[in-house]
Every structure is written in C-alpha cells, then in structure tokens.
Image (cartoon, grey):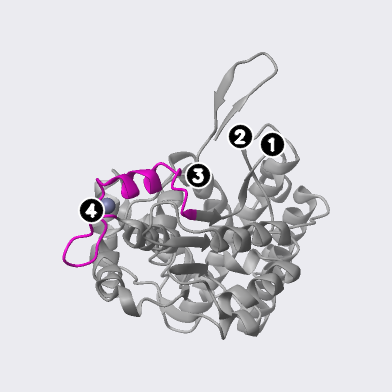
C-alpha cells in the first residue's frame, strides 16, 4: 500500500512480518496441503505459546495460494503467489493480527483486540472473487482477541464460506473462544518440536545457552528466543539471586528495578518479574513434591535448599496470589508497589 502525502512524497507502508516454516511443521503442513480438496474451510490451529502457530498458519496460507506447489502440496516459495504472500502483499491473503495501520496508512501499531470492523472487512474480502484464481485465505491470530461482536460477525462466514475460501484461526487459548466459533472450525493441534528439534533450531539462531533458554520457555523454542536475550538473562540473574536468599533479599532495591523508563516499560518490567516469580515458585512447588527445578535448572541447588524450608500450603497460596496479580496486569496500580508487596510476602514464606 503506497500513500501519497500532500507534498507528493510517496511512502512505502510497513508490512506485517513473514515467518518461515519451522522444521517440525513440515510433515503436518504437508499432510494438510497434500489433500487440498479435503482442506477444511475453517481451521482452528491451537497449541501452547511460542511453538510457531502463526508461522504454521502463514505457511498453510502460502501453500493454498502457491501457483506451483510441489508433490507434497508445499509452497514452492518462488512463484508470484508465494512471493506476494511472503512480502505481505498478496491480494488474496488477509491477516487479522494485533497490528493495524495508523492514520497515515504507512505505519503499523499494536492493538489489544480484533474489532468488529476488521471482521466486516474480512467478510467483504471473502466475497470478492480471487485475484490470482487460487484461493482466498484469511488468518486470524490470536483468534481469542476478537471481541464478542467480532466473533459474532464471523459466524455466518465460518459456517458457509464462499468456495475456495479458507479461514485459519490461531489460538493458544481455545477455551477463550466462544463455543459457537469453536464448533464451526476443524481443530488442528499445532505440531510441537521434540527437545532435540527445538535445541537444533535454537542452535541455528546462535543462542548461547539454548538448553537453559528452552527450559525457561517450557520447551517452546520461539519463546526461548526471548529468554535468551542477554539483557533479560542479566536481569533474571539479579532477581533469582535475590529470591535464592530470602533472608537477605533487599526488597526496596529489587522492587525499584521495576521503576526504570516510562509507563509501558514499567508495566513490561512488572510482567517480566511476575513471570520469573511464577516460574520460580512453580519450580519450588515441584521440588517440594519431589520433582525437578524444570524451568530454572541453573538454580536447582538454591531451590532444593528453599524447598526444605517452605510450608507447601503457604507456597501454594503465594503462587496463586502471583497468578492473580498477573491477571490484573492490564490495569496495575503502581508497578513498583505491586512488586514490593509480592517480595515482602515472598520473604515471609521462609520465616
Ligand atoms: Zn509458490
């Protein structure tokens, strides 16, 4: 999409990023695309966060739009259809994600929900005949972010899509979709990599301590990329070193680490701290129960020592309180105060 401004300067619009097919998805994608005549018109791709569900949806879309697919039905990657799709410019591919163009029509900005006007746009889109005569494909990700009106507006199209129209819904939380939407889609569990496949893929991305990043991400390789960020690892070390020694935990100083930057940054820092607290107390509960420090294997020693000192019921209540705080993240009071209160309660677990 190009936009001419009053000065006559033509700007190039940002495009939604393309995501390549992941190695553990080839077989699943091939199995669906090989039998194109049986490809469901509404597919609900579900599975945990960070395993590549959106990449899967985009590559299925590319396969459906490819103008010379291989014997497996996989996209060739080189035809016009494939190239337009990957460049974010295929006229028969519509992507409803949490990015929309702002007023200038050039820049993408993040939104919280997929609103009804965008679903109405989708309905108009599928009713037009296809530009390149292969198919019309719409990707909705994350589908559970459609608001109620949007989900409702989609029902009729889900039920009776025009011929050669494919709707690919993506969600990590299928339970948050209305049952009316779920029941109109064929569920498809996104393939998950084995630990070896995930580690091999992370190695190709140059991740230094891939096993630790993967452990923190619960085995989800795309999420592991974020965990491997050096700045994040350094901050994690500060927090976890503090949690490992509750009797010496400098509560105000640690809580104050939330306070850097503007409002959104403070919120993000609190979200990050809550995640570390959840993974840490989750590990602690597992160790109390005779299990392993699965998410923080590099702190197995301190976790074992703490497990011997904590009352299981108090730990359970605390973990639940942290979960409760995470649910309130959208409107936290004062991020630093939330962190401070949680740290005070954490220290009290070991008194
Ligand atoms: Zn192609």
Residue situated in front as seen by the camera: 285 or 122: 122
Mark with earlier residue (3, 4): 3
Residue 44 picture location, percent across and down? 49, 75
Residue 22 picture location, percent across and down? 30, 58
Task: Assign the C terminus to one quadrant of the image.
Answer: bottom right
Mark 4: C-beta under 8 Å from nearest atom of ligand 1: yes
* Picture disc at residue 184: none
Q: So how many labels did they put on this image?
A: 4
The relative height of residue 287 versus residue 200 in the rendered view (above or below) is: below
In terms of secondary structure, where does tag 2 sit?
loop
Which residue carries the number 3 mark? 16
Mark 1: C-beta under 8 Å from nearest atom of ligand 1: no
Mark with earlier residue (3, 1): 3
Which residue carries the number 4 mark? 76
Name the chief secondary structure element in magenta.
loop
State yes or no: residue 84 in magenta: yes
Mark with earlier residue (1, 4): 4
Which residue carries the number 1 mark? 260
* Mark 2–mark 3 distance (CA, rounded to whole Å): 10 Å
In terms of secondary structure, where does tag 1 sit?
loop
Residue situated in front as seen by the camera: 330 or 140: 140
Mark with earlier residue (2, 1): 2
The residue under the point 25% across, 69% down is 30
Q: Nearer the viewer, mark 4 or mark 2?
A: 4
* Picture disc at residue 107: 2
The magenta region covers: 67-93
């Amino acid at each position: 999409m190009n936009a001419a401004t009053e000065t006559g300067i033509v700007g190039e619009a940002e495009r939604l990023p393309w995501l390549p097919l992941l190695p553990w998805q080839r077989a699943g994608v091939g199995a669906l695309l090989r039998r194109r005549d049986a490809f469901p018109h509404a597919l609900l791709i579900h599975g945990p966060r960070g395993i590549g569900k959106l990449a899967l949806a985009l590559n299925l879309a590319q396969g459906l739009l490819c103008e010379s697919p291989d014997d497996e039905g996989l996209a060739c990657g080189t035809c016009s259809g494939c190239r337009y799709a990957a460049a974010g410019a295929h006229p028969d591919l519509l992507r409803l994600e949490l990015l929309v163009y702002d007023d200038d029509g050039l820049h993408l900005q993040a939104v919280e929900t997929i609103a009804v006007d965008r679903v109405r746009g989708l309905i108009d889109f599928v009713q037009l005949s296809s530009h390149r005569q292969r198919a019309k494909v719409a990707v909705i990700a994350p589908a559970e972010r459609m608001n109620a009106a949007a989900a409702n507006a989609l029902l009729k199209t889900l039920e009776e899509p025009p011929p050669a129209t494919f709707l690919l819904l993506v969600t990590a939380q299928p339970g948050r979709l209305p049952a009316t939407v779920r029941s109109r889609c064929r569920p498809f569990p996104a393939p998950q990599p084995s630990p070896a496949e995930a580690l091999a893929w992370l190695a190709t991305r140059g991740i230094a301590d891939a096993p630790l990043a993967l452990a923190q991400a619960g085995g989800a390789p795309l999420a592991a990329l974020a965990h491997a960020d050096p700045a994040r690892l350094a901050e994690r070390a500060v927090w976890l070193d503090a949690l490992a020694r509750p009797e010496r935990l400098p509560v105000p100083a640690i809580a104050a680490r939330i306070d850097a930057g503007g409002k959104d940054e403070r919120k993000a820092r609190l979200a990050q701290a809550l995640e570390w607290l959840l993974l840490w107390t989750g590990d602690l509960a597992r160790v109390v129960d005779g299990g392993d420090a699965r998410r923080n294997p590099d702190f197995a020693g301190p976790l074992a020592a703490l497990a011997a000192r904590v009352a299981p019921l108090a730990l359970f209540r605390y973990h639940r309180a942290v979960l409760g705080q995470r649910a309130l993240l959208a409107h936290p009071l004062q991020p630093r105060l939330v962190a401070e209160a949680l740290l005070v309660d954490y220290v009290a677990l070991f008194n």
